[in-house]
Image (tube, rainbow, N blue to C red):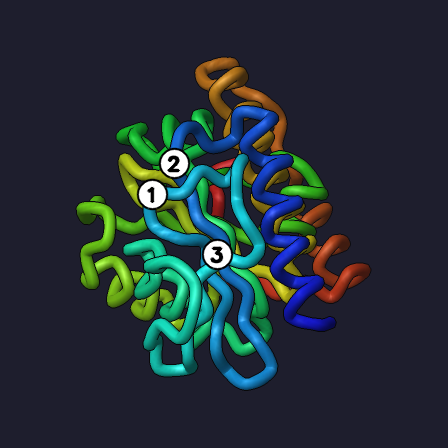
Amino acid sequence: MSETRLREDICRFGHSLFERGLTPGSSGNISVQLQDGGYLVTPTNASLGFLDPARLSRLSADGKLLSGDAPTKEVPLHAALYRTRSAAAAVVHLHSTHSVALSMLPEIEPRAALPPMTAYYLMKCGTTALVPYYRPGDPAVADAIKGLAGKYASVLLANHGPVVSGDTLEAAVFAMEELEETAKLYLLLRGLNPRYLSPEQIADLVKTFGLTLPEHKHDL
């Protein structure tokens, strides 16, 4: 896909996410890895609803700004996912309400932030990790992501928001939407003793769709 098309897609998906209230104000950021190893990244203090394709930040493989506006301060977070997940070609980070709320709950397990609630959650997001709170832009969050050893495509940053990688920008956006809706389901059903997918049902999904899930035993 051409760089021009990728620039247009970042702006199109960003506008869609913003218009549906999935990341307010100037929060959230999107990146796409290019064939030369560099990146297109949304600029700092830019609303995803009003992006200009020509002003997106173009970074070299080592993170130097080549053209466009100054990049989001979350570049280390994005770079950590690319370095640890070889299949990652795009990363989306939002401040979506239900996922942020989920990240603040005391019972959330760091290596399984959500139980196996639906088939599409597992198919799109896999298992979601929770990393501790770091201030936005803190390089330590990149170290926390690297500590996950590439096992998770979806991660919650405590008291901050979700970050998801995908093998295409579309896949990353769709997975982010699925994560947000699953977080919403969890909050709606919290305390109601809902029925989750059984180990046998999860095994069937893994076999049928070739899923790779980090090993974790949920309390079903």
Q: Earlier in the sequence, mark 1 or mark 2?
A: 2
- Residue under pointer 2: 26
Amino acid type assigned to the residue bearing label 3 in the image: Arg
* Cα distance between the residues tagged 1 and 2: 5 Å
Residues at marks 3 and 1, CA–CA distance in whole angstroms: 12 Å
Nearer-N-terminus badge (3/1): 1
Q: Amino acid at mark 1?
A: Asn
Could you tell whether 110 is left or right of 138 in the image? right
Residue at (48, 56) in percent of width and height: 55
- Report which residue position mark 1 lands on: 45
Q: What residue appears at the point 42 percent right and 51 percent down from the top-left corner? A: 155
Q: Is 183 in front, or is 73?
A: 73
Q: Is residue 207 visible?
A: yes
Do callouts 1 and 2 mark residues in contact (Cβ within 8 Å)?
yes
Q: Secondary structure at mark 2?
A: loop
Residue 111 appears anywhere in the view: no
- Residue at 47% from the left image edge and 66% from the top image edge: 151
